[in-house]
Amino acid sequence: MRQLEINMRESFNLAKTDIFKLQSDMAELRKGQQMIMNLLSRIKAGPKTSSRKTYVASVTGKKVHESNCPFAKNIKPKNRLMYRKKSVALNTGYKACECMKRM
Ligand SMILES: [Zn+2]
């Protein structure tokens, strides 16, 4: 009777460690799932953000650039003017940089 009790306790403990292992595996899995979800939402957000393109001009310059143009990145923040629409910048008197003609 006592031996049976010991056996039961042992198998119970084994089951318990199995459960703990399973739980940590699940946590890892959930972490992975969360990472995939984050990645997917970033991919989904991708086209939206690129269509929300901005145009950058300098108060001291004569040209307007796309925000990712190297010239745009050289403009000092205090001289930087941001435009949502290319036409607005062009109407202000700025000329389109080569970076915009490429698109
Ligand atoms: Zn440019």
Image (tube, rainbow, N blue to C red):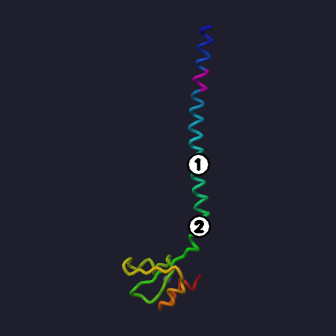
Give whichever of discs 2 and 1 has the lower sequence position. 1
Q: Amino acid at mark 1?
A: Gly
Image coords of residue 66 (percent x, y): 51, 80
Seen from the viewer's position, the closer of residues 56 and 22 is: 56
Which residue is denoted by mark 1 in the rendering?
A: 32
Q: Assess mark 2: CB under 8 A from ligand 1?
A: no
SS at circle 1:
helix
Q: Amino acid at mark 2?
A: Gly
| Quarter of the image where one finds residue 6 | top right
Q: Residue furthest left?
A: 78
| Quarter of the image where one finds residue 81 | bottom left
Q: Which residues are magenta?
A: 11-15
Counting other residues with Cα less than 10 Å from the Cα at mark 1, is it few (<14), some (14-19), or many (20 or more)? few
Seen from the viewer's position, the closer of residues 33 and 89 is: 89
Q: Residue furthest top?
A: 1
* Residue 95 horizontal side relative to residue 78, left or right: right
User: Which residue is depicted at the point 56% across and 38% down?
Assistant: 24
Do the numbered discs 2 and 1 sit on residues whose CB atoms are within 8 Å? Answer: no
Image coords of residue 38 (percent x, y): 57, 56
Q: Is residue 33 above or below residue 102?
A: above
Label 2 to label 1: alpha-carbon separation: 21 Å
Closer to the eye: label 2 or 1: 2
SS at circle 2:
helix
Which residue is denoted by mark 2 in the rendering?
A: 46
Q: Is residue 26 above or below residue 80?
A: above
Image coords of residue 22 (percent x, y): 60, 35
Q: Main secondary structure of the magenta part?
A: helix
User: Which residue is depicted at the point 62% across and 63% down?
Assistant: 44
